[in-house]
Image (tube, rainbow, N blue to C red):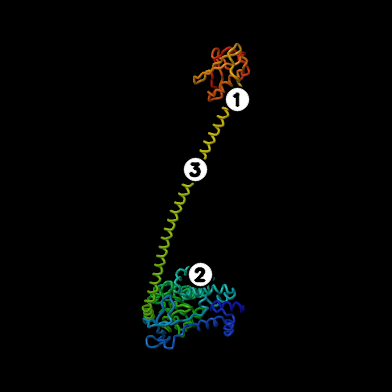
Amino acid sequence: MVDVADKLAYFQAITGLEDPDLCTEILAAHGWDLELAISSITSTNTTTPPANSTTTPAVATSSGDDRGVTRSSSEPPRFGAPERSEAAAGPGLAWKIVTLPISVISGGLGLISGAIGLGLWAAGGVLSYSMGMVGLGSGSGRNSEASARLVPLSAAASEAMEFVAAFERDYGTTTMTRPNFVSQGFMDALQRSRNEFKLLFVYLHSPDHPDTPLFCERTLCSEALAAFVNENFVAWGGSIRASEGFKMSNSLKASRFPFCAVVMAATNQRIALLQQVEGPKSPEEMLTILQKVLEESAPVLVAGRLEAEERRTNTRLREEQDAAYQAALEADQARERQKREEQERLEREAAEAERKRKEEEEALERAAREAAEKEAALARMRQEKALSLGDEPEKGPNVTQVLVRFPNGERKERRFHSTSTIQSLYDYVDSLGCLETENYSLVSNFPRVVYGPDKLSSSLKEAGLHPQASLFVESNS
């Protein structure tokens, strides 16, 4: 047994009533029958015409050639739009509003009980699905493909498939000689007709009625009628032995069979009944009736189609404008990005150039500093070596006269004690600062003698340079 709390939650979700005490009283008054309780709310919310209204209520007429054809005189609703509360004189199209039972809207009692068992969340899903199928908002075209069944195959669709299979088995499988009944539940068929801007042709099949076989064979399956229905209508059929067919016969108040009707979607879980035909009819009579309904409803269908086309055009224009704006935006962003990248590249190059300039400056400063330090070291070294030589001695028997010739042709001469070492001659040359190299040797020509490192400690006299000598500075590099 379904839990009372789940029934209460589902009732609140469907009706929009928030007071739990009020909802509990309504459900208790209807013996906790959800369908009866919800029907009582939807019926009490239907707008009642004022007493002085010129609207004519639904009237069934049965005279002459219109016998068994039930119509009502009032303005037709816009195709795919809510009916107006105050009806004006219409173009002659007869219609009336029929409220569907909640079990048909939600796909059968099994689906309702399943939603109750799942709780409020599932109930909200059933409500959204039901209202999306019956409602007539501007976004229905976009949402039609996204709307999916709550179950892989609903009970209503299964019944429709069984009816189509049985009809084909009994009266032929060629769609040229029979209406092309859709294998969908009533609400899906209604939505399909709405999407295709066609009226919905409804046939309620009574297998036990004596007129049914002849009507199906000679009228419904006549080539002219079948072609007309298939071209201008979406056809749905249901057996009154099945759940949905039985409920639709109650909703449409079918009193005689065979029963046919022409309906279109209205709003708030209702449909507009444009025409109903009860009892057997010939193909010619059916064609005349359907042609008249189609002619009278043509302005509504054309207006709906034009509105949809206008919506599609506006949508396409908006999409094109959005695409153009997006393309312009992306182009601007690309230019801005390119400009930013170029600026960053220039900044990187400038930073790199500045870094190199600083490195070069630092290298020059370092080289200059090293050169200065080296020059200062050489100056100190020359000064130290000059001091180490002491004063130049006067001429005498123990004094050696030495002449030094430099590679540039410059000549320098000085007197040394004969006991001074060869190292003193090198110190003297170094103290002059006439050479750019430190790697050199002192050489005599006749005979050629190189006074290298092995002779540095020898005295001038021991080296054979006393009393006088002439030496050349020879670079070793």
Res. 333 visible in picture:
yes
- First reached walking from the N terminus: tag 2 or tag 1: 2
* Residue tagged 3: 354
The three-letter code of the residue at mark 2 reads Ala
Q: How far apart are marks 2 and 1 (CA)?
A: 106 Å
Position in image of residue 383 (x %, y %)? 58, 25
Position in image of residue 146 (x %, y %)? 49, 68
The three-letter code of the residue at mark 1 reads Glu
* Residue 183 position (above or below residue 475): below
* Residue tagged 1: 384
* Residue 121 position (above or below residue 441): below
Q: Distance between the residues labelled 3 and 2?
A: 67 Å
Q: Nearer the viewer, residue 151 or 32?
A: 32
Q: Residues within 10 Å of mark 3 (few under 14, many from 20)?
A: few
Position in image of residue 133 (x %, y %)? 48, 74
Question: Residue extending furthest top?
Answer: 397
Q: Quadrant of residue 8?
A: bottom right
**Direction from residue 39 to residue 226 in the image, left or right:** left
Camera-side mark, 2 or 1: 1
Q: Quadrant of residue 280?
A: bottom left
Label 3: state its secondary structure: helix
